[in-house]
Each structure stands twice: as C-alpha cells, then as structure tokens.
Amino acid sequence: METGQLQLQLTTYCSTVVKLDVGGFADDVIGRVMVGTNQRHLTDWGMSWLQAYLGGKTVTRHGEELGRTWLGDGTISMEQSLIDGAGNECFEGINHKELQMDYFVCRSVIEYLLNPNLQSPNDCPPIGSGFD
C-alpha cells in the first residue's frame, strides 16, 4: 500500500478506523494511540496557516457537530484519534508534525516495544471538553 493510501485509511471515518473502533483488536494485538494536544492554548505552535487561522485549535467532530478544540495536534483532534480498546497517551504541546520526532514520544514507543505488557497511562482528557 502506498503512503497516500495509508494516510487515507487513517482518517476519521475511513473503513479501517471504523472497523477498529467497532470491532476492537484481536486478542493478541495491543492497540496504543499517542496524540498531541494544545491544552496550554498556544496560538502559534509551528503549524500551518489553517491552525494559525483557528488560533491554535484543531477542527473536530463531536457527534454530528463540527467545531474547534484545544484537544488536538493541529491536524487531527484527540476525539477522532481515540479507538475503543486501545490505550492512550497524550503529549501536551506536541503538534502533528513533531509527534513522530519528539523525544518523549519516541521513548514511549521504545518502552512499549521492549515491554509489550506495559500499561498505557490513559491520560487523555475527557472527550468533548474544550469544544467550541
């Protein structure tokens, strides 16, 4: 599968994410979601013109409503990232472009690979908070 096809399969309502969210994971698979958030309300944190226009918030869908939230990485909101049955870990102040290069994110990935039974902190804020 090409990179463009992979990215399409990770959008909010694509068939892959919907199947994971509804069906969960196989018994021998441990799902983990790592997301960046902007809970400190930074208005310029290295993102695109769209995030600058949104004042540092991320577009999100809450039910059928579209809005903006501080609980996102500037590209994907936390609410659209979380998958039922997967552990989660939030990284404050880390935007979408920085997530895969951040020291603490990489350290967590390595820790999970070395110790697959390590519990995720499940420290993401409640869904729907910070929505406008």
Image (cartoon, grey):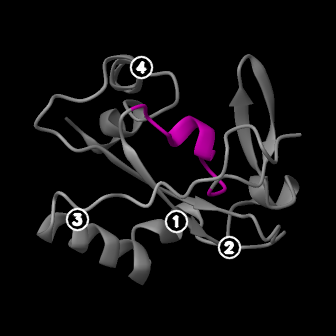
Instruction: State the separation of the CA atoms marked 4 and 1.
Output: 24 Å
Q: What residue type is labelled 3?
A: Tyr
Contact between labelled residues 1 and 2, with CB atoms less than 8 Å apart: yes
Q: Residue 61: percent from the left, percent from the top?
A: 70, 29
Quarter residue 77 falls in: top right
Vertical arrangement, residue 72 with respect to residue 95, above or below: above
The residue positioned 16% from the left and 59% from the top of the image is 116
Give 115 or 18, whichever is nearer the viewer. 115
- Is residue 79 part of the magenta span, yes or no? yes
Q: Which amino acid does label 1 sit on?
A: Lys
The mark that comes first in sequence, 4 or 1, is 4
Q: What residue type is labelled 4?
A: Val
Which residue does the numbered mark 3 point to in the structure image?
A: 112
| Screen quadrant of the C terminus | top right
Secondary structure mainly formed by the magenta segment: loop
The residue positioned 19% from the left and 35% from the top of the image is 1
Instruction: Mark 4 vs mark 1: give the one in front.
Output: 4
Vertical arrangement, residue 114 with respect to residue 96, above or below: below
Which residue does the numbered mark 4 point to in the structure image?
A: 18
Q: Which amino acid does label 2 sit on?
A: Gly
Q: Residue 33: percent from the left, percent from the top?
A: 41, 50
Which residue does the numbered mark 1 point to in the structure image?
A: 97
Residue 46 has which mark?
A: 2
